[in-house]
Amino acid sequence: MSDAPFEILGSPSKGGFLIIGDHASNRVPNDINLGIDRASLEAHVAWDIGVAPVARLIAKDDKFAAFLGGYSRLVVDLNRDAHDPAAIPVESDGMPIPDNALSPMEKEIRLERFHKPYHEHLQQLLASHRPALILSLHSFTPALDSKPNEARPWEVGVLYNEQETPSKIAIPFLEDAGYLVGDQLPYSGKVLNATMNRHAEANKIPYIGIEMRQDLSASLEGQARYARVLINMCNFVSEHLGLIT
């Protein structure tokens, strides 16, 4: 695989559906050391567990393509503004990332290598193949290590910022599909929505932000169910809004 900080699945098409998965990978380049053990790269702090396999299942449908982040969010968090301190995190869920304590010049080099080309390519992709609807796909841990007593029972979270209509249509659809749905849970898209703010809201592209719970998105059965329901959800929302697909 190339050094590109993204992977494209399927064939993006004007008027189709595009999945965007900022945290789909836990890869770390060989020349970058984070100062953490290998086991930590398999945990939720390093990536959104289940996003890549679910995106691959959905992208088998010709209406869908996917644009997935190619490296761990511990290398650079693509769902942060470039100069947000959390873009290169020095801790995650209470776990220190000691070798991310970089100088200002080192931070700029890393952002130029990973953050900038990811967002520039996504911007170009959306301009040339503007989708009818974006599915922003993430996943969340059932329990944070730093907040073990905080209940996170939702099976799907739906996030949005200023553009609310697609998500408000999606929520009852997901409930009817049998999921326990969190509206702006486990956190709010009005607080954390950098990629969608930049690429969807700024360009008036309809989108839905989805958070899958990782104990479900980690299993083959859970992945198949999420993929099936999310395909149907995107079609339903698109038809309800009169979008061309």
Image: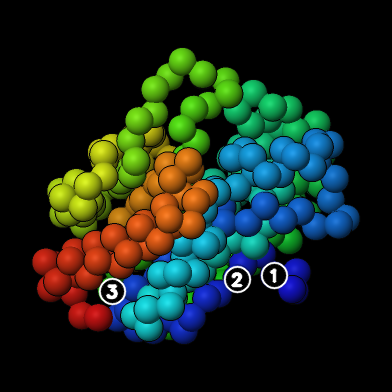
Q: Is residue 116 visible?
A: no
Relative depth, front residue between 116 and 182: 182
* Label 3 or label 1, whichever comes before in sequence order: 1
Q: CA distance from mark 1 to mark 2?
A: 8 Å
Relative depth, front residue between 140 and 73: 140
Q: Residues within 10 Å of mark 2 (few under 14, many from 20)?
A: some
216 to the left or right of 163: right
- Asked if the residue at tag 3 contacts the one at tag 2, i.e. Cβ–Cβ closer than 8 Å, the answer is no
Picture layout, residue 160 above or below residue 143: below
Q: Which residue is mark 1?
A: 4
Residue 135 x %, y %: 36, 61
Q: Which residue is mark 2?
A: 7
Residue at disc 3, secondary structure: loop
* Label 2 or label 3, whichever comes before in sequence order: 2
* Total numbered badges shown on the rendered structure: 3
Residue at position x 38%, y 34% in the image: 187
Which three-letter amino acid code belongs to the residue tagged 1? Ala
Marks 1, 2: nearer the viewer: 2
Which three-letter amino acid code belongs to the residue tagged 2? Glu
Residue 101 x %, y %: 79, 34
Picture layout, residue 71 above or below residue 36: below
Q: Which mark is residue 132?
A: 3
